[in-house]
Amino acid sequence: MTSTFHGLETARRGLVTQQNALYVTGHNISNANTPGFSRQRVNFVQTEPYPAAAMNRPQIPGQMGTGVEAGSIQRVRESFLDYQYQGENNKLGYWSSRATSLSKMESIMNEPSEDGLSAVMGQFWQSLQDLSVYPENQGTRSVVLERGQAVVDTFHYLHDSLTSIKDDLGNEVSVGLRDINSILKKIGDINESIASVEPHGYLPNDLYDERDNLVDQLSEYVNIKVEKVSSGGNSLDIAEGKYNIKLLDASGKDTGVFLVNGADYSQMGFQGGDDKIAYNPSGSIEKGDLKLFDAKGEVKLKDLSLVDDNGAMNFSQGKLRGLIESYGYKTYDASGTETGEKGIYPDMLDNLDKLAFTFGNVFNAVQKEGYGLPGTAKADNFFNLGSLSTSNYKGASSSIQMADLLPEQIAASTIEDNAGDGTNAINMSNIQGWELSSTTPKELEGLSATLNLPSLSAIGNGTMKSFYEGMIGKLGVDAQQANRLQNNSQTLRQSVDENRQSVSSVSLDEEMTNMIKFQAAYNAAARNITIIDEMLDKIINGLGTGGR
């Protein structure tokens, strides 16, 4: 038979367990507004019934329940939603980075507007057309010089502004790497703490939350794969264990690179002196620049692949890749020979250099074929391009200058000592529409000389006007795509986050209901003790009192 006090012990367990549940409810309510907090619940478990199955068990009709206990305190979270969130967060990080970079570039290029390069060059071409009508007018000639200077100033402004933003992007790469390394270290430290708690049969729920928040932050920078590894010992089956985090490549494949392996963590950065970690990119980022370092900041054996053998970007998707693509990186052909630099800002600066060089070089060629006002020497260059050439045009947008010309030296005429002739001014104003790749010698109106345009141009096909329109058009399309995909990723991430919050976040209504439920159960258990006490009182004090 069961013990006389069996009911008391059963009721006591009910009291304690409902009390624990109320404590957990209070913890949930307290953290209702804590970012990243996952609501927790007590997993109620029936205690071992009496008697246990054995040969010497007491002869009673059946096993009798002995009450309840708190089996574990578990956070409510769905790992699949975490995986989805991290994927969308990774895409958002990449497209946000590109959208921001392109937006800054659009604000610099300032097209279409009255201050953009297109408008300034248009005013310059118009001043040449005016000159063709009034070639002997000093005022019209001065306007041509002023408009030419405005074009040069605009090239300088665009180059300096784009270069400044590019340098800022380099600093952002540095800040991003420091942030990544800080996150990796924290995850490694938390893994170590979790590994010291779980073997004792506990669930460190708050550490789980903190670690998942860090993994969410890391997923914004790079694409990762999280593997759970048991802490061993007496860990519960529902324990989440340690996180091993691997880096994925551009196509989402496992690179085999461990960013975190239990308590061991890696660092990402550039190689500095003595194989120590450095953060600031020096010039263009090259193929083997980005490396993996150990916790002490010393180079590990594995390099992080930035570009594949064909020169295509192969680095993991995310904000860091978006920053590197904006800042620029060197490319290589199949034989490993460097082929140049790619990236949003390097490409725009390169195109700007091509345009500035071609503009100045072709204009000089036409200027030198004509004549200024009577009494001036044979026309010289209009723009100063230094030692630049079609194969070495880099930096033209920053180095192009106006030559030291007087207004009367502008070669508007095709006839020497003829102040009223403005034919060559027409030639100069038509430069913007010339097909630069044409191998047919370009004939100049009023002159017997011809120009070999491909030898004067750094631009492949089309005209200067169409080349610049193509630059601006591509910028607009890229920015539009980045904004659209940024918005799409943001919407999807928000949707997944809302689903995640519906599972993990604290609902005060639900917690209030639970509080009443647990209170009622506690009160019932207390009343049960009272009833049993009255019963025992009858046995102890009410029986066997005859003859008193």
Image: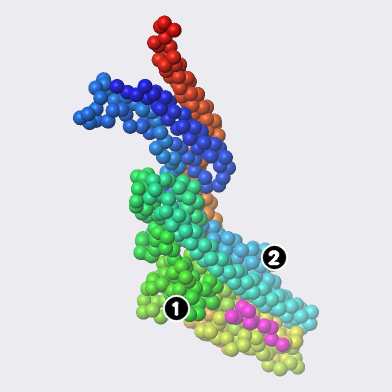
Who is closer to the viewer here, 430 or 401? 401
Q: Position of residue 488 (x, y in %)?
A: 50, 50
Crowd around label 1: few <14 · some 14–19 · many ≥20 (10 Å): few
Who is closer to the viewer here, 438 or 282? 282
Residue 114 appears in view: yes
Determine the secondary structure under disc 1: strand
Numbered tag placed on residue 313 in the rendering: none
Q: Is 470 located above or below residue 69 in the figure?
A: below
Examine the structure image and report whether residue 397 is included in the region drawn in magenta: yes
Quadrant for the C terminus in the image? top left
Magenta-drawn segment: 395-404
Q: Is 131 located above or below residue 47 in the figure?
A: below
The amino acid sitting under disc 2 is: Glu
The amino acid sitting under disc 1 is: Thr
Please report the residue visible at 51 percent of the width from the left and 33 percent of the height from the top.
22
Q: Position of residue 402 (x, y in %)?
A: 69, 83
Please report the residue visible at 50 percent of the width from the left and 51 percent of the height from the top.
210
Who is closer to the viewer here, 76 or 408? 76
Q: Quadrant of residue 160?
A: bottom right
Numbered tag placed on residue 339 in the rendering: 1
Please report the residue visible at 60 percent of the width from the left and 83 percent of the height from the top.
361
Q: Nearer the viewer, mark 2 or mark 1?
A: 1
Numbered tag placed on residue 114 in the rendering: 2
Q: Which circle's residue, 2 or 1, is located before the other in the chain?
A: 2
